[in-house]
Amino acid sequence: MVSKTEETQLNRLENQVDNGGGGVWEYLCLVRKLNVRRSEKVLKHGLSILNDHKKRSALGHEEWTLYEQVAIAAMDCQCLDVAKDCIKVLQKKFPESKRVGRLEGMLLEAKGSWAEAEKVYSSLLEDNPLDQVVHKRKVAMAKAQGNISGAIEWLNKYLEIFMADHDAWRELAEIYVSLQMYKQAAFCYEELILSQSTVPLYHLAYADVLYTIGGLENLQTAKKYYASTIDLTGGKNTRALLGICLCTSAIAQLSKGRNKEDKESPELHTLAATALEKDYKQKAADKLGLLTSALKSLKI
Amino acid sequence: MVTELKYEISQNAYIKLVLHALKHKTTAVNGVLLGRVNPQKENVVEILDSVPLFHSNLALLPPLEIALIMVEEHYGSEGLGIVGYFHANERFDDAELGILAKNIGDHICRYFPQAALLLLDNRKLEALPKGKDQSPMMQLYIRDASKNWKLVGPDAGSRLLIKEPAANIVLSDYIASEKWQDVVDFDDHLDDIKKDWLNPEFLK
């Protein structure tokens, strides 16, 4: 999960590197730190260092980290020969290493040799049942083979042990959403909000899920979470502002005939609409007309 | 005798959707098809444009609702409506039309009963650079009389046509030059409203 500032910084660096402006190692470190998936770039630029003897030795002991990073990127790009070479180097340097063992498992995965990869991972888990990366590889394998229920089962088991792994909760939530199992997805986001209450992404996702489930109570709660997202993002989140408008409209439709007034925050949707219009006027003026019509059709 | 429904997709609409899928290789993506019934030939639906929608959390309602409202508003003023839906599955091996696509398709059918569902054909796309295939890299699904989505058989090539016969050559060129980097979808717009989901300069 990456913030807008982090993404801008990353893209700026990537651009610089792509255009030969240097900063390759800095870029590769940032990719690692942010845990983003830019495999083609990592492969290309990582190899440019690894294939150059001088640049490689300049890295000192970080050389091995780079071999690992490039191996994984190569596997993601299906450049299995490159991956194999990198892993060989690491095997030579660190024989008997569990970390390299994981890479061997991943290479088998990349080849589609699921059963053999499974064997490697099981044996690694026997030696260290608390190896989080290996547990997650098993989930990834299930997903890759289209065994979504297996992935869910394994991920739930994983979370029973490692309940503080936020990425895992998010992954589970997104799998549930993809299967339209919204109530289960909501539960995951509830866990995330409980443990990290100031991360706006979780509030937003929770609101989106509640709105999707529908029903008056869920819509009212969704509206609250869109509001808290706006709070946590200083009013800059377009999705949350639009969410407020959608909720207001849907709630009004469901409350038709009842005298239930939205006592909570009657001006909230007007504020949201105004903020949106101001934003569009400034940054997307050609779409302002569309926004205004959209808001009108929502009866805002 | 009832003449069979045929769908004709414009090169731009077609290429935009495929490139969108290629931009986001690791997730499912979707998009909507814009067009109209051919004024001279009632059994031909013209797909004149497409809007790439999302590359994450496709099954969440709020972004989809907003997107459909804005898309309909824009194209309505040009005399076009939503005539179908495009979906590309997350996994290469997954050639199944999922429930989400069917649900969205059903929704579109309420306003346009002849709506089409297009599913990206990964294997065909993989073989693209090697062959001289002029048919679209997509599978066509239409609703039958019992409102079930049915794959239009191996002769789909005759019921889903790309208007411009050289479209796949153009597509191959764009893939080679990595043109898919420039595709903007509705997700991108919601993250940064300066990005234009209409992709106005994209294939000019």
Image (cartoon, helix red, strand yellow):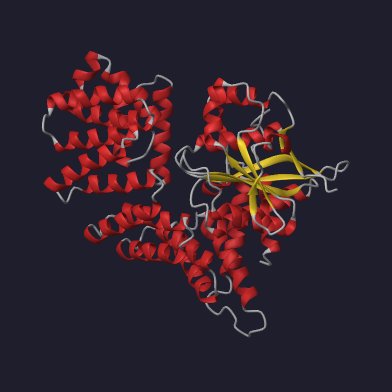
Image side of residue A195 versus residue A3, left or right = left
Residue A201 in view, yes or no: no
Q: Outermost residue toward the right? A: B40
Please state the total of marks drawn on the protein image: 0
Residue A31 in view, yes or no: yes
Measured as percent of width and height from the top left, residue A288 is found at 67, 50
Above or below, comparing residue B162 to residue B153 in the picture: above
Measured as percent of width and height from the top left, residue A290 is found at 69, 52
Above or below, comparing residue B3 to residue A27 in the picture: below
The quadrant in which the C terminus of chain A is found is: bottom right
Q: Outermost residue toward the top? A: A53
User: What residue is at 52 percent from the left and 77 percent from the top?
Assistant: A264
Q: Outermost residue toward the front? A: B1
Q: Outermost residue toward the bottom? A: A259
User: What residue is at 62 percent from the left and 35 percent from the top?
Assistant: B16
User: What residue is at 22 percent from the left and 41 percent from the top?
Assistant: A119
Measured as percent of width and height from the top left, residue A99 is found at 18, 37
